Image: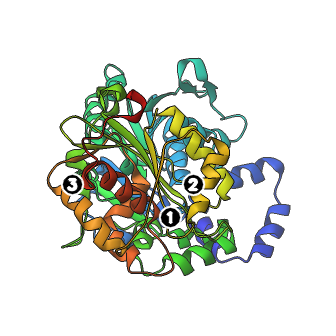
Amino acid sequence: MKLRKSLRRLTKNKIERFIETLSDKQAEQLNYDWILWARDDQLPPSLQPRNMLKESKLGDVANWQNWVLLGGRGAGKTRAGAEWVRAMALGIAPFANSPAWRIALIGETFNDVREVMLEGDSGLLNIHPNHQRPNYIASRKRLEWPNGAIAQLFSAEEPESLRGPQFHIAWCDEFAKWQYDTEVWDMLQFGLRLGDRPQSIITTTPRNKRQLKAILDMPKTHISKAATFANRHNLAQVFLSNIEHNYAGTNLGRQELYGEIIEDSEGALWCYETIEKLRRCKKDYDFDQFSRIVLAIDPPATSHKKSDACGMIVAAMDEQQHAYILADVTMTSVSPINWAKKAVEVYHLFNIDRIVAEVNQGGEMVETILRTIDDQISYSGVFARKDKKSRAEPVAALYEQGKVHHLGLFDQLEDEMCQFDHIASRSTKSPDRVDALVWAVSHLLLNGRANVPRIRDL
């Protein structure tokens, strides 16, 4: 710890000169000694300085069970999680007294586990010196360290896959994005039964999710927080300038940049709790059972890099006249021809009855460019005669009545919905996903077309 403090007092040039005096072996040891380079919030509770533990609920920080890292985008959460797993798997002091032989790695999907937790720049396969590097066996979905420690890979889309295996520790990444967070968490608790003190680390940008808040309230949970800007020396200055300019002072910025949980605002059109209560599992539905399926498009006014996104939402209606959100295929920073190609592709993929597009900005251009791709599509243009909030209020009321359901988790759309009031009041950003959602649900349930048969069936 003394060396850590000494290095932090040195300038970059002095550190480089110091490294030149070391042998190759010493330089490697220095480079891979995480405790030297980590920020205080990236260290487990037992290694954090006392001033960071004042607000902790833990009486004894050595006996923590869950360590939750709430951080903004790019704050270094993945690196902290990977380094903790490496230290635990190899039994590296002062993180561990002995190796954790059985480990669970859980991400939102298998692709996220592989692309982020394993193969990402801060992933497990890129933070070990060569002689410690684990071997990834894709066919068995596992990592094997040279010392015999094993990590199994799991997707949070499959809670039942956690039945049976047992573990010393677990790493849960982007927990707030998991659709089946409660089910996966429950199955994991039954499997964390090896060793004297099984532990979990959760690395996530927070969202207002019931299960996450329940974990935060547990007596043996320690919480670390880090803003995106805490990791500024590893992030592009242009990125930092852009996000600070666009999102500083907003609820979305507080959540995505500063790692804060944004509670539902009183009087907001949508809240996370309502959306969560009405969520349904996609695998329980056959799309052929829907009486209508539409694609709603909220096209951007321009196509340059800083233009608004092209909001595109697929929604369906059943015979009970309930609406279901099937997909969010919104595109950003694309030309009209590119979002039109995507729209036609989605039209055929979902066997859609009609494309509904707002034409305030593009007028006849929207239909023209869509028919350039496929002149056989069914299309309706809609014109916005009210402001965004006035158009959204009737759709929000349908949610309150329990008539709109999300088939799966749409985190970007749902964040935009719950922060709609704040976003809509700003002139610098448009709630494109919500606009498309409003057009889709309105077309299905609110404009007198609920009893129109599927066009493909005529």
What residue appears at the point 59 percent right and 71 percent down from the top-left corner?
5
Which residue is found at the position 21% from the left and 46% from the top?
278
Marks 1 and 2, how far apart in space?
9 Å
Give the quarter of the figure containing the N terminus: bottom right
Q: Are marks 3 and 1 in contact (CB under 8 Å)?
A: no
Q: Amino acid at mark 3?
A: Tyr
Q: Position of residue 324 (x, y in %)?
A: 30, 42
Which residue in the structure is indicated by mark 3?
399
The mark found on residue 367 in the picture is: 2
Of circles 2 and 3, which is in front? 2
Q: Position of residue 230 (x, y in %)?
A: 54, 71
Q: Earlier in the sequence, mark 2 or mark 3?
A: 2
The tag on residue 359 is 1
Q: Could you classify mark 2 by the number of other residues whose Cα lies within 10 Å: few (under 14), some (14-19), or many (20 or more)? A: many
Q: Secondary structure at mark 2?
A: helix
Horizontal side, residue 19 vs residue 305: left or right: right
Image coordinates of residue 209 in percent, x first then y, are 28, 54
Q: Nearer the viewer, residue 374 or 458?
A: 458
Amino acid type, label 2: Glu
Q: Are marks 1 and 2 in contact (CB under 8 Å)?
A: yes
Please tell me the numbered disc located at residue 217.
none
Q: Is residue 363 visible?
A: yes
